[in-house]
Amino acid sequence: MFSCTFGGVGSPLGLWAVRSPTGEREQTVTPTETERHELWKGLGEVLPEAQVRTLMDSLPPVDWSELATKTDLVALEERLDLKSDARFAKIDSRFTETNAKFEGVDAKFEGVNAKFEGVHGKFERVEGRIDKRVAQLLVGMAVLLTPVYLALFAGFGG
């Protein structure tokens, strides 16, 4: 059988100290709502209602060890800051790596663009030579075919 005492030595107010039958182990348990209500009624027999309310309002509805202190919150904030700083540093390094890769890709595209400009220039020169040669061929054909056309037209007309 377990024995329970309220507010035992080393036990914060509002907790039940529970001892095992051997008395070797002690743990604290947050009182249930029924136990809190009974405490309220018991205190109401010896204290004015306003003092009972003040006392009961000062007792947390959870185990005291579950409450965070300002020191706990500062320590948590520091840990979170360290974690977020480390994660942002990792993200920053990844962006740096990615930017470097993009710069390499940009440099390759600039090389490709330069090659295309060279090819474009060659095509323009070839196109100019083709245009010139086609013009020469057309003139040559006209010169060669003019007597043939004249003979044909003369033969049809005569």
Image: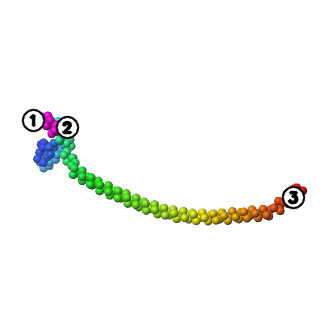
Closer to viewer: mark 1 or mark 3: 3
Whether residue 7 is visible to the viewer of this picture, yes or no, is yes
Q: Amino acid at mark 3?
A: Ala
Q: Can you say which quadrant of the picture contains the C terminus?
A: bottom right
Dot 2: what SS?
helix
How far apart are labels 1 and 2 at the CA level? Answer: 20 Å
Which one is nearer the viewer's eye here, 45 or 26?
A: 45
Image position of 109 (left or right of 41):
right
Image location of residue 11, percent across then percent down: 14, 46
Residue at figure coordinates x 83%, y 62% from the top left: 147
* Disc 2: which residue: 33
For residue 46, the mark is: 1
Q: What is the span of residues highlighted in magenta in the rendered image?
A: 46-56
Q: Can you say which quadrant of the picture contains the N terminus?
A: top left
Q: Main secondary structure of the magenta part?
A: helix
Q: Amino acid at mark 1?
A: Val
Image position of 85 (left or right of 109):
left
Which one is nearer the viewer's eye here, 30 or 91?
A: 91
The crowd level at tag 3 (other Cα within 10 Å; few <14, some 14-19, many 20+) is few
The crowd level at tag 2 (other Cα within 10 Å; few <14, some 14-19, many 20+) is few
Image position of 19 (left or right of 89):
left
* Disc 3: which residue: 154
130 is higher (above) or lower (below) than 48: below
Dot 1: what SS?
helix
Closer to viewer: mark 3 or mark 2: 3
